[in-house]
Amino acid sequence: MRVKFKSCRGHVTVLLGLMCLYYGCNLAQQWSENYALLPGVTASDPAIIDGKPETIGQSQRKKGSGNVVTDLDIPSEAIIYLPEKKSVYRIVIHSTNLEEFELMAYNSRGEWDKIYDQRSNKDPILDIRLNKVVMTTGIKLVVHRTTEDAARRRENVQIRRENVEIKEGQVRRGRYLYHITGPTTALAKISEIELYGYEN
């Protein structure tokens, strides 16, 4: 018994054509110029957008309440403001000590939306591709942990015993207390933050 198979050459041709069109478009698509270097762009630390990898900027501590204990968990941040809305899809961060962080975009309501987060990092250059293009006039890097935090805690957190004088010349040993003499987290060292979209 002879079985006849219907030719699928036409379907294969269409499929190959669609694949070529898809990959052709992607190959032709180019990154935009670095938006962070455009005229009118400002940053919380100008060194992070000067186009010079040898100059090192830092994240900035947010203004706290003035209470050391309350302000312990307030992260530092680095902000870039664009003079006009841009479609951002790729963000490149050059940092030697950045470990855990979030990226946020400034929206039309004057609020910050989280667009990316990373819980651990060992790379000095992070090349981040967002899940979708973000239209924004500002990008904020929120620093939750750096590789130098432990050293800063050892330097600025001390344990002392709280002794109480009960009689003249007699002292009763009390409980141990933590004394915080300075910040318990380090600032992120950032040489550059680059922002890219696609060329039109």
Image (tube, rainbow, N blue to C red):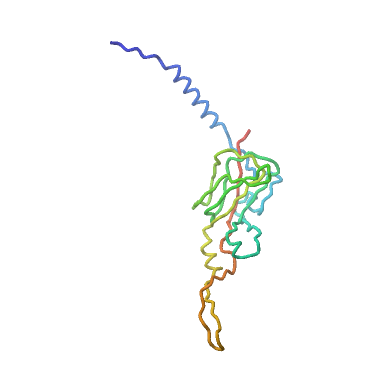
The N terminus, quarter of image: top left
Residue located farthest toward the top when viewing the structure as drawn: 1
Q: How far from the left and from the top, in percent, is residue 138? A: 65, 46
Which residue sits at x=54%, y=32%?
26
Image: 101 above or below 184: above
Residue 180: x and y in percent read: 57, 69
Name the residue nearer the viewer: 77 or 35. 77
Q: Say which quarter of the image contains residue 32.
A: top right
As drawn, which residue projects farthest toward the front?
A: 166
Q: Position of residue 182 (x, y in %)?
A: 59, 67
When asked about the image quadrant of residue 200, the answer is top right
Residue 125 percent location from the top left of the image: 53, 49
Residue 35: quarter of image = top right
39 or 14: nearer the viewer: 14
Residue 53 seen in this snapshot: no
* Residue in view at x 62 percent, y 51 percent: 52
Residue at the bottom extreme?
168
Residue reaching furthest to the left:
1
Residue 134 visible (yes or no):
yes
Depicted 150 relative to depicted 129: above or below: below
Report the residue at 54% width, 39% height from top. Answer: 131
Side of 115 where 81 appears, left or right: right
Q: Which residue is at 52% across, 67% downward?
A: 154
Q: Disc count in the image?
A: 0
